Amino acid sequence: MKFLKRFFSKSKNRELKPELMELTDQLFPEEETDQRRIGHYVLDHCEQIIESARELVEEKKEYQIVTSYLKDIEFLTNLSEEQKAPLRDVAENILKLSDERDRYLNTSKKISDAQYVMLEQMEHEIPDVVRRMKENETYQTTVKQDMAYLEGEKMQWMLLRSDLLHEKYILRMASYIVFSAFFLLIVVLLVLQAGFSFDITWGWIILAVLATGSGFFIIFRYQNDVSGIARAEINANHAISLLNKTKIKYVNITNAVDYACEKYHVKNAKDLEYQWEQYVEETKRKERYMRMNDDLAYYNNKLVSMLTDFHLYDAGAWIDQPVALINPNEMSEMKHNLLVRRQKLRARIQYNANVVEAERAQIDQLMKLHPEYEEEIREIIRSVDKLSVGEI
């Protein structure tokens, strides 16, 4: 039990051996061997008496304190129900507030202390920072999508230009072939007309129609390819220009997002928003904790004031034992533990009293056996008494 520790802490015994050794050298010169031996014998017994007496004094003090607490328990147990009721109400409030405070202290933090301090220092700007980071990340995503779209547009126009250049080359080769073919056909028709007197009127008509049609088709497609190539180059250059501008925007917005993440030690706006929510919650919990401490101090003072009116030995001790004021079983257990402790103290007091008595009897017996040294022995005892003043 906590409050038992208040009166069972013992001060450390100070050793008298250095003083006794010095006293031995002063009282017994080395040449007086027999007298020195008796003196040492007496000093040993005196030292034991001092130690036992010191223990005896401390144990009696503890015994009185235990008895005082037992009287307090007996008094509180015998109070009427009307007198116990307000004490029980205050004790219940203390117990409830103490439990809530313990739960707060045992709750694990979701943000580090360093992060909490940083958010506390920037408390007024964090909501705007979260909003800007969200907007920047949304804009970053949009710009990235635009980059992908413009990259696709650029590739599409570059592929179209490449296809049109290839078709233009094929048309040029085809025009050479068609021209050569028509030239051979003209030669054939002239040979037939001049050498064999054939009527080749329809041949000339068909050749003219074919020449006109194929020539028109090749020229039309060729011109169409030329204009298509020019249009593809213009559109590709425009896409490249927009893509370069968009890349600059992407780099700038990415730098802004990365800087914010580095500044606030987060991964993204969602992470910062989560930490901000945890900071707000932790701040509310700390405020509740402070209110709990204030309320707990109020009820502690109230309990001490109420118990002081009963003139108890230690009214403040019951702050640590509110459950005993609520539960009679706890009060009975405290009383039992104190009774056991007092019984042990009584046994120790009796033991040390017997030791003191026995040691004193040994010294008295020594004076009877050596009456010639009785005056010296009494001088030793008087000297030891002077050394031990304030010790016992």
Image: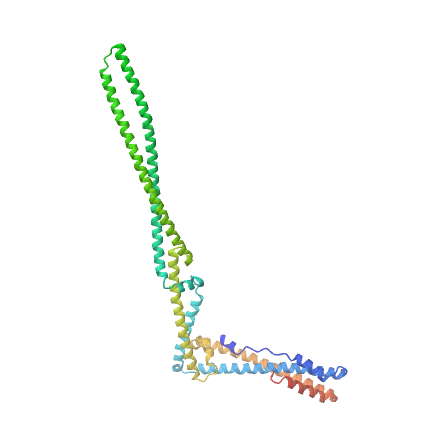
Q: Which of 323 and 213 is in front in this view?
A: 213
- Determine the image quadrant of residue 342: bottom right
Quarter of the picture containing the C terminus is bottom right
Residue 368's spot in the image, x, y percent?
A: 72, 88
Q: Is residue 322 depicted above or below 269 in this figure? A: below
Marks counted in the figure total 0
**Residue 333 position within the rendered picture, expressed as x and y whole percent measured from the top left:** 48, 76
* Residue 110 sits in quarter: bottom left
Residue 169 place in picture, x, y as percent: 34, 29
Query: Residue 347: x percent and y percent?
Result: 58, 80
Colouring mode (rainbow / by chain / secondary structure / one colour)? rainbow
In the rendered structure, the answer to whether residue 335 lies left or right of residue 363 reads left
Which residue is nearer to you in this view: 219 or 268?
219
Residue 152, quarter of the rendered image? top left
* Relative side of 298 to 381, left or right: left
Look at 34% across and 54% down and name the residue there.
Answer: 135
Name the side, left or right, on which 382 lies relative to 336.
right
**Camera-nearest residue between 330 and 284:** 284
Examine the rendered structure and indicate whether residue 53 appears above or below residue 201. Answer: below
Q: In the figure, 260 relative to 180: above or below? A: below
Residue at far top of view: 196
Left/right placement of residue 54 relative to residue 77 reads right
